Structures are given as structure tokens and as C-alpha cells.
Amino acid sequence: MEAATLPLSPARDAGITYGTLRRPSFPRVRATPATTYNADAWSPSEEVAIPVNATDSSELGSTPLSVTSEVGHRLFELIRYSTEDDEPLPTQESISGLWAFFDRCPTAKNPLLTSDSDGSLVATWRISTVSMLSIRFLDRARIQFAWAREDKNGKVKREWGEDRCENFVSSFAYAKEFIGGGN
């Protein structure tokens, strides 16, 4: 099996530590404290006990660092499960796009994270049974998006397209509602 090259510097810069969690990882729920290990390849491994307070896109009040850390952990879990199941790994370009998005929108809520068959990461924020936003990260600059939103009368509006990562949040009218962010 060919080893994947992963950009560890954003994770290391954010102070992310990766630990073992019990399956299923998606969607995550509140769990008992876990033991994590320092994932920095340049320093000795150290065991750290941290409380696991997993979030999903419906939880409000998360700090940018906790969301970035949780997204990093979900990415790690996604790669781990993809490897175990012989599924395609997320591409380097798509991972870079995910981190670029969270760099531009640090107040975003925690999304559900998946990968499609060609290795592109897909982040999904769901605010109700019908209303959701999915962003597919093609590379560091380009995204594809699809959203559906139910209005007060029960009618559903849908839209999809392609945009530049840096333009999407500021130009998307429902950004605050779906991802809770902005620049």
C-alpha cells in the first residue's frame, strides 16, 4: 500500500493532538475522556489525557481552536478509516483547501466531514432535516457547493455551483446561518 503524504504543519501549528476513539466516529457524540498522543513528528511522543467534548454542526459556542482541533481529529479519523477499508484517501489539494477555508473562516461551526470517491473532502453543515450546506474542496482555492434551505412557509430553495474559497463566505447570503461565520 502506498503511503499518503499529509500536511502536518497546520495541525501542528493549531496544537492538535490525535487520539484513539471508539467507532463509530461519524457523527460523534459526547464521550468519556480519551488518551491522546502528541502527533508532532519532531518531538518525543507524550501521552496526554484530555476530555473529549465532541461537537457537531448544531452546537453553538465552540471556540475557533476547538473547532479546528475537532476538524483535524475528524480528518485523521477519516484517513484512518479510509485506509482500513481500502477506500481512496483524501487528496493533498483537498486537505489544503479544507485548512484554507478554516483559515479564512475561523468562526465556522464544526462540520460533518466525508470524502468522495476521487479523494475530495466534503464538509457538510446541517441546520435542520432539510436545510444543509455542503462544500467540496477541489484544491486550495476552488470549491463546489450545494445548499438547500427551507423557508418559513415550508418551501425549499436549492442552489449549487462552483466558487473560489476566499469569495464564498462573504458572498453567500446564508453563511452565518449555516456555518456561523464570516471573516
Image: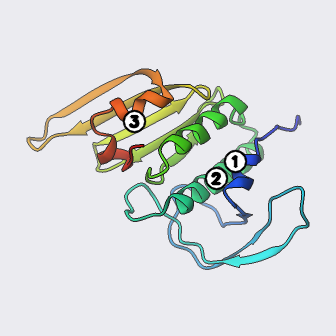
Residue at mark 2: 72
Residue at 8% of width from left, 41% of height from top? 153
Residue at mark 3: 169
The answer to whether one can see residue 168 in this image is yes
| SS at circle 3 | helix
Amino acid bearing label 2: Gly
Whole-percent x, y for residue 51 in the image: 61, 77
| Mark 1 crowd level (few <14, some 14–19, many ≥20, 10 Å Cα) | some
Q: Is residue 179 left or right of residue 84?
A: left
Residue at mark 1: 10
Q: Nearer the viewer, mark 1 or mark 2?
A: 1
| Mark 2 crowd level (few <14, some 14–19, many ≥20, 10 Å Cα) | many
Q: Is residue 173 left or right of residue 111?
A: left
Q: Quadrant of residue 13?
A: bottom right
Instruction: Between residue 100 and residue 35, name the one nearer to us.
Output: 100
| SS at circle 1 | helix
Whole-percent x, y for residue 63 in the image: 48, 63
Q: Is residue 181 left or right of residue 166?
A: left
Please say if 84 is above or below 96. below
| SS at circle 2 | helix
Please say if 84 is above or below 168. below
Q: Earlier in the sequence, mark 1 or mark 3?
A: 1
Q: Quadrant of residue 175?
A: top left
Q: Which residue is outermost to the front?
A: 183
The CA span between labels 2 and 3 is 20 Å
Q: Earlier in the sequence, mark 1 or mark 2?
A: 1
Task: Check whether the beta carbons of the residues at disc 1 and disc 2 lie within 8 A of each other.
Answer: yes
The CA span between labels 1 and 2 is 9 Å
Task: Check whether the beta carbons of the residues at disc 2 and disc 3 lie within 8 A of each other.
Answer: no
Instruction: Between residue 63 and residue 144, name the one nearer to us.
Output: 63
User: What colour scheme was applied to this rendering of the protein?
Assistant: rainbow
